[in-house]
């Protein structure tokens, strides 16, 4: 990955985001050089490795972005991740050079929830499970726990291509919501709430909950 890349993997994309991405690169010879190498290895750029932002490089960026958005509709990924995956598969066209022979590749990716995303999920689950808001300590604790679990369980995608047809199978990763539910529902507070809920239901059934 080129040092100082302005677009983190997994980030959402808009036209303004893409324009800003290119603007940052165009001002940095080091980034231009790094991306010209990536784009060339991925098969999008045919020119010489350069530190100058040229029309040919602009066209290569645009084509790569179009392809990334196309696949991101079903498998979201960042720009660097997309280029690395494309290189692993032998470049655009699967390295077949028009021969249409079968090719395959394996991509491993680790998705780490950021603190804002994790906090929103933790807040929701604690509210549903414990009936209250999460404390600052709980947000810190469960965010760290979730990110640690995600690091230990990367997703592995296997690709198989033949001509213009490509299939993929993804395994691994974790269900973030279920992971947090299991963690939070296993606390003493959650267990006590569950017992109390059973008791209230029982008393109401006997007519003693009034």
Image (spheres, rainbow, N blue to C red):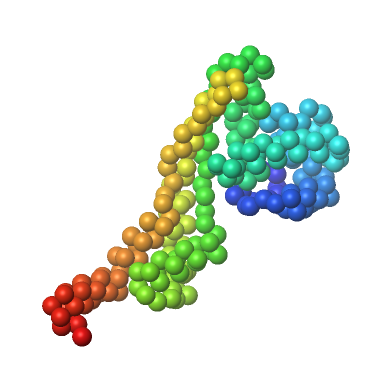
The mark total stands at: 0
Observer able to see residue 28: no
Q: Is residue 181 above or below residue 95?
A: below
Q: Is residue 192 left or right of residue 66?
A: left
Comparing 158 with 1, the one in front is: 158
Q: Is residue 154 left or right of residue 183?
A: right
**x, y (%) of residue 136?**
47, 75
**Residue shown at 33%/60% (left/top)?**
182
Q: Is residue 114 left or right of residue 26?
A: left
**x, y (%) of residue 13?**
67, 50
Q: Is residue 174 above or below residue 43?
A: below
Observer able to see residue 200: yes
Residue 178 occupies which quadrant of the picture? bottom left
Comparing 29 with 158, the one in front is: 158
Quadrant of the frame with the N terminus = top right
Q: Residue placed farthest to the bottom in the image? A: 210
**Residue shown at 63%/31% (left/top)?**
87
Q: Is residue 126 above or below residue 86?
A: below
Residue 123 occupies which quadrant of the picture? bottom left
**Residue shown at 43%/76% (left/top)?**
133
């Amino acid at each position: 990955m080129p040092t100082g890349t302005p677009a983190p993997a997994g980030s959402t994309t808009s036209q303004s985001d893409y324009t800003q991405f290119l603007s940052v690169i165009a001002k940095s010879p080091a980034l231009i050089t790094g991306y010209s190498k990536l784009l060339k290895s991925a098969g999008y750029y045919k020119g010489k490795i350069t530190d100058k932002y040229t029309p040919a490089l602009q066209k290569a960026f645009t084509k790569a972005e179009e392809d990334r958005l196309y696949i991101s509709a079903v498998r979201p990924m960042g720009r660097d991740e997309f280029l690395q995956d494309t290189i692993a598969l032998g470049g655009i066209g699967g390295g077949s050079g028009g021969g249409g022979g079968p090719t395959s590749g394996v991509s491993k990716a680790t998705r780490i929830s950021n603190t804002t995303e994790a906090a929103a999920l933790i807040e929701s689950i604690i509210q549903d499970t414990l009936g209250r808001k999460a404390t600052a300590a709980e947000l810190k604790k469960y965010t760290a726990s979730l990110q640690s679990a995600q690091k230990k369980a990367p997703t592995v995608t296997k690709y198989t291509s033949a001509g213009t047809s490509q299939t993929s199978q993804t395994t691994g990763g974790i269900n973030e919501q279920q992971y947090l539910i299991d963690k939070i529902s296993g606390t003493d507070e959650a267990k006590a709430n569950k017992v109390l809920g059973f008791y209230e239901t029982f008393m109401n059934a006997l007519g003693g909950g009034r």
